[in-house]
Amino acid sequence: MSYELIAILMFSSMMLMLMTGQRVFGAIGGVAAVAAMALYGTGGVDLPFSAAMKLMKWYPLLTLPMFIFMGYVLSESKIADDLYKMFHVWMGPIKGGLAIGTILLMVLVSAMNGLSVAGMAIGATIALPELLRRGYDKRMVTGVVQAGSSLGILVPPSVVLVLYAMIARQPVGQLWLAGVMPGLLMATLFIVYIAVRCRLQPELGPPLPADERNVSRAEKMRLLRAGLLPIVIFAAMMVPFVNGWTSLVESSAIGAMTAFMAAVLKGRMTREVFENSVRNTLGISCMFMWIILAALGFGAVFDGLGAVKAIENLFTNELGLDPWTILILMQLSFLIMGTFLDDTAMLVIVAPLYVPLVAALGFDLIWYGVLYTITTQIAYMTPPFGYNLFLMRAMAPPEISLRDIYVSIIPFALVMLVALALVMAFPQIALWLPGYVYGL
């Protein structure tokens, strides 16, 4: 059996196991283990051992539990609630203002957490009931919460970009900075869409009633100060890192400690909040560790077979495809996989194949990391099995049906496709900021 056929068999076996509902790390690691033993005999046991040692030596991996803990502290202690109160008062008087405020809330939550799940939870529990109670169209606000929560995997400190950096061997700092402008671009496009739509159809997003708009300037400033606390936490973490005063791990520790101290000073760090934050941090961190370990083992076998060279030869020589066509096909494959896989699973499945291929085609791996992340965001919300669709169904009130959720996301997915096309057509949208900061 040729190595190319073995590689295809490995990939198809893994996809089949994932489609049957197996755990991601079990499917990837299981296929890697069977392939290693079949190809190399007893020497195949060295592959998972080597992968485990490589994982343990990845010092930047310490950032994952730090960022996850920071996000859960801010969420569990209800500090994020202050943000929404601020946007409620400042943005409520304009048409669609609360929906626009929800997008801004999601941007700041993303800067605090780095996971879309946390943004979805905050949006569904804080923003969604308020929007519905004030007469906003249920399909409009459902789409707003889903689209806004997806920014968590693009705006720094994105956990997904940290994983991509580890697998693709790229600097995390550059990837974070590369995600800033595309993330803000996408948020701006969301806001423009909401503003235009609500101006044309005011019944979709009515302004706040007059009695709720009559808030004193002193109260507005108090809410503004309370809502800006997460921004202070983000700045305390990112400014030293960007200026080179601290390492990535040190900055993540500063962020986690600052969030913890903020919760303590506000009197919200109860025993329950601390236990929930630590328990959730441990669960998600272990999940990521197992997935990365399985991906490293799979990648070692896959690379050893020369699969990347075979795929590159198939696309460029036998099929005669140009690099941009190959890149677009790879992005389409992400959209398809996103109907039944989450972002981490997609990354670890295709990284051994796509990352070397992208480098061989002459594309920038920092830029491609941003493209992957945006495509993942879109795939998250692609019917019929988009990951965010079912998260929203689990968190939404009973009056919002699955059909409403499917329909609500269509315009926002189109907006995200526009953002993806802009970043593909103009790579400097992603590459300008890291180039400026690091002098590249």
Image (cartoon, rainbow, N blue to C red):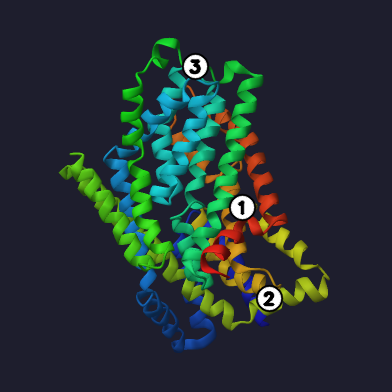
Q: Secondary structure at mark 2?
A: helix
Split into 4 quadrants, where in the image is the C terminus? bottom right
Q: Position of residue 92 (x, y in %)?
A: 46, 22
Q: Earlier in the sequence, mark 3 or mark 2?
A: 3
Residue indicated by mark 3: 135
Front position in the image: 14 or 352: 352
Q: Earlier in the sequence, mark 2 or mark 1?
A: 2
Mark 2 vs 1: CB contact within 8 A = no
Split into 4 quadrants, where in the image is the N terminus? bottom right
At x 54%, y 84%, the residue is 39
Residue 428 seen from this side: yes
Amino acid type, callout 1: Thr
Front position in the image: 272 or 301: 272
Amino acid type, callout 2: Ala
Amino acid type, callout 3: Gly
Q: Which mark is on residue 375? A: 1
At x 32%, y 35%, the residue is 225
Q: Which mark is on residue 360? A: 2
Query: Hey, which residue is sitting farthest front in the picture?
Result: 217
Q: Position of residue 197 (x, y in %)?
A: 64, 25
Give neighbour class at mark 2: few <14, some 14-19, many 20+ (Cα, 10 Å): some
